[in-house]
Amino acid sequence: MKIKVNGREHEVESDPDTPLLYVLRNDLALNGAKFGCGLGQCGACTVMVDNEAVFSCLTPLLVVQDREITTVEGLGSIDNPGPLQRAFIEEQAAQCGYCIAGMMMRAESLLQKNPHPSDGEIRAALEPNLCRCGTHMRILRAVRRAAELMRIAALGTAPRAP
Amino acid sequence: MTAFKTFLAIIGLCLAVTLGFVAIAWRAPIDPVSPPSASGFDPALVRRGAQLAAAGNCSTCHTAPGGRAFVGGRALPTPFGTIYSTNITPDPVTGIGRWPEEAFRRALAEGVDRAGRHLYPAFPYDHFRLLTRDDARALYAFFMTREPVSATPSANEVAFPLNVRMLLAGWKILFLRQGSYQQNPAQSEAWNRGAYLAEGLAHCGACHTPRNRLGAEKASERFAGGEVEGWNAYALNEASPAPVPWDADSLRFYLTNGWHDAHGVARGPMAAVVDNLAAIPDADMKAIATYVASIAGEVSAERRRAAEALIANTRNPTGQSIVGTEASGENIFYAACASCHEGDRGLPFGGVNLALSTGPSGPNPDNVINVVLWGLPPADGARSPVMPGFAGSLSDQQLVALLSYVRSRFSDKPAWANLDKEVRDAKSGGRPSSVYPAHGIDPAQATLNRGEEP
């Protein structure tokens, strides 16, 4: 079956009911999305499908053929991190980091639809994603910072130093 | 001259009719009292009031999302505008602290507040009027002993002329019946108790009976099923779409626990109802179940046999799996749904076998669309059944394919019409629906003092 991840087409051999998460991690070596609960209740596996945040542990391969999948690897690289990744680094939002890829993907989906979210909107959007270390306040700051970095980038001006 | 006389006569008539209407609609204010002391109420009466408030589901409307119970301010969307629930804590200025019992009773029976203003029928006085004097007194004792909270809800958003409250007197002449509950001597004591509660305080018909264009329950279609907050409140009468007919035992279990293994989990606005009902005495629950089961009438032996066969069938899952790689409704069902909905884990934490669920047999796809899109979010502070939502992972086309398959496989009813539009409207918010956890903790629980717990 064919799937398109971070702009690249892949041919995979897995069964159609295989969760997308397993395909990403085991077949494509995209290990950003994490296995947390396997029940769609923690958000560690969150990726974007057609710009919507979804639990990849519950999303069968069958339904994502011909759709655009984006993982945290698609937001930027180590050498050239994207605005969300930069913001999370600058705010030091990760403690153990297990939830962070999922947090970033859900935040990315929010910011694409709503470049100026209020704190309430950020909280509401990120609600399905759990963090057990308790870095929620830093995560909120990071999402706000990312929104600002994206706005600056959209204006075409140089971003301010952190 | 005749024309002038006719003109005068018409003016006079209009004036007389208006004055007559005002005379009928006018309700005198009832003098405020100084707030009664909480310690002046008999604790046993307060406890009974707590149970009655639970049976009446008061906290659901009189609590804003995330707010303190009974403080009001919850937006209630109606076809006539948005109405905000009132503060029914005993705050002397913003609540009912200066209401004498007589005013409280009048509000329940006639839908008129202490100051004499007509209340909108979003407050179901067309049911509460059945309350006995003793029960109204217990409810009053319960509310007057809660902690007073100063809070004024937002002003109602109801357009002219419906914001003229006096017009509600006209609505009441048309639709509000008078009188207390009349015992039916042909029925058992439990049935009568159940009818008194279900028709009165519990106001089941407020959601389960369809409403006319003026927002009143249609007297000729009692319990024929209604719409509330984007959800279908299924018919409870002989038109009940449940594949397995309800009986008093299954209803009692369902209303007590929020789920039943041959029917599924209470969700949507019904979830709050069962959270509330958990606090009422078992004898009352039994009575309500007895009465509600009787609304559907006797179930034919044939229908009962069919239901038993259905239940037996679900114990032997087909073990079917996916054929090919096409995202057909059947393949999506087996890839995304079957692991829970045809799995080994039973209710309430597993998924109901859809052959037993009322959803696929419902009169429209609203409820199934709501749960597939938004799932059942986990409850705060309580164990609860959960279901993930699939709004992001299934495309509109895939959802339509899945819903068509679910309808044709798990129901013997004709296909749902306009599924494309239904799915689009639900996703875009064109048809708004409330999303609630399947179980929660009734906010009223937080207002209970030691010794008042059920």
Image (cartoon, coloured by chain):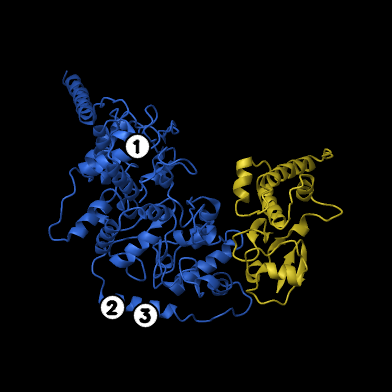
Chain colours: A yellow, B blue
Whether labels 1 and 3 share one chain: yes
> Mark 1 highlights which residue?
B145
Q: Earlier in the sequence, mark 2 or mark 3?
A: 2
Q: Are marks 2 and 3 in contact (CB under 8 Å)?
A: no
Question: Residue B450's x, y, as percent?
Answer: 39, 44
B81 and B30: which is toward the camera? B30
Whether residue B175 is visible here, answered yes or no, is no
Q: Earlier in the sequence, mark 2 or mark 1?
A: 1
* Residue B77 to residue A8: above or below: above
Question: What secondary structure is found at the residue carrying circle 3?
Answer: helix
* Residue at the (42%, 80%) spot, across then down: B313
* Left or right position of B292 against B354: left
> Mark 3 highlights which residue?
B309
Whether labels 2 and 3 share one chain: yes
Q: Amino acid at mark 3?
A: Ala
Mark 1 falls within which chain?
Answer: B
Mark 3 falls within which chain?
Answer: B
* Left or right position of B349 against B193: right
Crowdedness of circle 1 by 10 Å Cα count: few (<14), some, many (20+)?
many
Crowdedness of circle 3 by 10 Å Cα count: few (<14), some, many (20+)?
few
What is the distance, in whole Å, between disc 1 and disc 3 at their CAs? 52 Å
B440 and B411: which is toward the camera? B440
Q: Amino acid at mark 2?
A: Glu
Question: Residue B254's x, y, as percent?
Answer: 37, 63
* Residue A58 to residue A89: above or below: below
What is the distance, in whole Å, between disc 2 and disc 3 at their CAs? 11 Å
Question: What secondary structure is found at the residue carrying circle 1?
Answer: loop
Q: Residue furthest right?
A: A79
Question: What secondary structure is found at the residue carrying circle 2?
Answer: helix
